[in-house]
Amino acid sequence: WRTLLLADRRILIDFEMVLVPRYSLSQTTTHVVIEVTLPHVRVSMKSVDLLVVDGVEFHLHAPPAYLLRLTLPDRVVDEDAVEESLAALANDVQTHHETIYTKADLPRLIYNPEKNHGTLIVSMRKESERFWEDLDLLGKLQEPAPNQRRKQESRASKLVAEIDSQKSLSAESASADECLASIKYSDSPSYGLFQQHSNVFRDYAREGLTLEMIECKNPDDTLDARSADQDRRAMRLETENEKFDPDRYLNDLCVEEDGDMIFDCAMSMEPHWATSVTELTEKLSKLTTSAVDASTFFTEEESNTLASIPSKGLPDFETLTKEQSHAAFLCLVDVLFSYAYDHRTTDGDPTVESSWTLMILSPALSWLENYKPPYDSIQDVLIWSTRRSIIYP
């Protein structure tokens, strides 16, 4: 159990049972509206706790187990702003707010039991009359505020320091072999998104299970971690050359004579992304953040999927270099190539082999390829993906 402090009251919540409800946001220039879906739950308005901290931290607790915490892009009117305005009005002094706020401007909470089998609607007034950007990016809204993030990082650094001190004490009593092994593992190569991971496959490789997940036999076993990327790329190209079957490739030239049902279906299929540049431009131009026309770039299902992706462990995207961003986009290209290939060959209906197809066609997934722009270009990525599409499936 942990204690969550809301205003001056302490609410005891079992965090193992806490659920993040589905929600959506809409806005006008003056207000932002959050609709929180609580299906098949009897909600008592007296038990619902709503709190806005520092004008940007939104907290909503709906018993028995719903908890929603958001960081808003800008400030909304909270109790502190109203108290400051009323005090300034009573004392006839100026306030830093351009508008005098009253209790009528505080967040309003309405419960609609008929909408989606139960929906809480929270309407909040903005301090600055303007449209907010990126309200579709629900996962971004769930990230902690900068001041809370610094506190979490401070607590994490203390915990790491404590663990490191314990490791140093245990190392004194460890055997020489264990010490050498720990030194060896500390110099393991890194891979994954922005090269944040290492030693993920070591235990699997020891059991011979790595090849069931990726094609690289043991990505954690390289002579020099500094040249691991080059080593993996060289091994990948060598493996592709060994597995290429020229007879099978030439046999595909006879498709028109003998017929190939999968090939014919793939060529005649119209995928869901097939649209002209003009149509796509028109759709993007119609996007709006107003509450009157709430059409958004993401569907409701896509927004909730993005919101469910944990942000823990992800880097601060605002601090990424241009090369890191380009490398991530190149990885995305080869994954999208794999998806497009599988989508066409399965006629849009994924099979039990689809996960293997996605992995084997993508150098980033099968060999943990680390693209390094400007040396690697989108042309290189497409060539390598096409090579693998000719060799494997």
Image: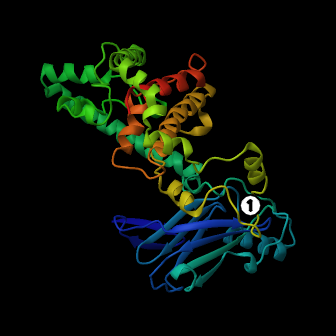
Q: Is residue 58 left or right of residue 32?
A: left
Q: Which amino acid does label 1 sit on?
A: Thr
Where is residue 16? Give x, y as percent.
Answer: 34, 64
Front residue (pair 12, 73): 73
Secondary element type, mark 1: loop
Identify the residue at image location x=43%, y=32%: 361
Front residue (pair 95, 356): 356
Instruction: Report which residue position mark 1 lands on.
Output: 289
The image shows residue 342, relative to residue 62, as above or below, that is: above
Where is residue 322? Give x, y as percent.
Answer: 63, 27
The image shows residue 10, relative to residue 178, as above or below, that is: below
Q: In this orientation, does residue 213 appear?
A: yes
Front residue (pair 80, 363): 363
Q: Which of the 4 quarters of the picture holds residue 238?
A: top left
Of the 4 image quadrants, the one containing the N terminus is bottom left
Where is residue 64? Give x, y as percent.
Answer: 41, 77
Q: Is residue 172 left or right of residue 20?
A: left
Q: In this orientation, does residue 369 appear?
A: no
Q: Which of the 4 quarters of the picture holds residue 326?
A: top right
Q: Is residue 366 left or right of residue 6?
A: left
Front residue (pair 122, 38): 38
Of the 4 image quadrants, the one containing the C terminus is top left
Where is residue 114? Give x, y as percent.
Answer: 56, 86
